[in-house]
Image (cartoon, rainbow, N blue to C red):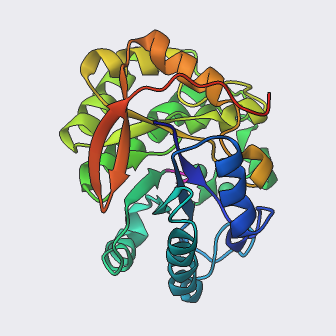
Amino acid sequence: MIVDYHVHTFMCGHAAGTLDELVEAAIARGLDEVGIADHMPLYYFEDPDLAMAPDELPLYVERVLDLQERYRDRITVRLGIEADYEPATQEMRVEILGRYQWDYVIGSVHILGDWVFDDPRRLERYQGLDVDQFYLDYLGAVGDMAETGLYNTVGHADLAKKFDVRAKIDLEPHYRELLGKVKDADMCYEVNTAGLRWPVKEMYPAPDFVRIACEMGVPVTLGSDAHSPADVARDFDAAIALISEAGYQSIAAFEGGAMRLVPLPEYQPPDH
Ligand SMILES: [Zn+2]
Ligand SMILES: [Zn+2]
């Protein structure tokens, strides 16, 4: 079975295409399930170029449920959301997430302190940065996120590398510590192919992370982090190869917040 659980919509302000075009693309690529998981309102500040506004969330849910209904005979559409973790506004997130029956919630760290470090408009902050400490702060925040118990899957687990700024320290013990928390929270993480489209030119997370996660028994799922129909399931042949080489024989799938494991697919993209 093939799933793409990380697909954005135009509602976030930085993605292209209609909702129907996203689902049609998923069907054309031979997926069994497509999970729409747009950026949840941020709450730490409002930026119409980063996420929908708080009052748009009900409309988002309505639109995804409508897709689910209309495409029922052709593909399974899942209701997901990519929710941030940001300690100061976490209470708000807990309350709002509790209002809807999500198939799954992706937990992502995009902000450290007041810095949205993955925003290409905020690159000046990388100048003179203590990169090792930045990685430790980032991985620490992802671990804190897992410990909240609010999320089902870790989004782009090593996003700190997005602009190819690399830590010098050995990250393996920190990956292990984080993965212990992910496992204790009964979460999985995604292999996210979007890294291939950014300066780092590598999927999230790094092959070492995937190998250690498999060894520790932490489940994995698939996400393209598509911000346009063309990117749905993009590079999934490479993602499935990475997962398989790490030793996995299954991937995680979600319904109503419950995870189940399904056999790892062979994947030949039909349009290649
Ligand atoms: Zn985005
Ligand atoms: Zn993200």
Q: Indicate the position of residue 207 as horizontal and vertical percent values.
A: 52, 16
**Observer able to see residue 255:** yes
- Residue 75 in the image: above or below residue 269: below
Along the horizontal axis of the image, is 155 left or right of 103?
A: right
Q: Say which residue appears at 80% left-offset and 64% top-offset.
A: 17
Q: Indicate the position of residue 180 as horizontal and vertical percent values.
A: 24, 30
Along the horizontal axis of the image, is 169 left or right of 45?
A: left
In-front residue for pair 106/118? 106
Q: Which residues are magenta?
A: 109-113
Looking at this view, name the residue that lies furthest to the front.
73
Q: Say which residue appears at 72% left-offset and 30% top-offset.
A: 196
Q: Say which residue appears at 72% left-offset and 76% top-offset.
A: 48
Query: Residue 253 lies in what quarter of the image?
Result: top left
Is 81 within the magenta? no
Looking at this view, name the residue that lies furthest to the left.
184
- Residue 141 in the image: above or below residue 192: below
Q: Say which residue appears at 63% left-offset and 30% top-offset.
A: 236
In-front residue for pair 92/16? 16
Quadrant including the C terminus:
top right
In-front residue for pair 178/208? 208
Predominant SS along the magenta part = loop
Is 111 within the magenta? yes
Query: Residue 42 lies in what quarter of the image?
Result: bottom right
Q: Indicate the position of residue 113 as horizontal and vertical percent values.
A: 52, 56
**Observer able to see residue 130:** no
Query: Residue 60 lies in what quarter of the image?
Result: bottom right
Q: How many marks?
A: 0
Quadrant including the N terminus:
top left
In-front residue for pair 103/135? 103
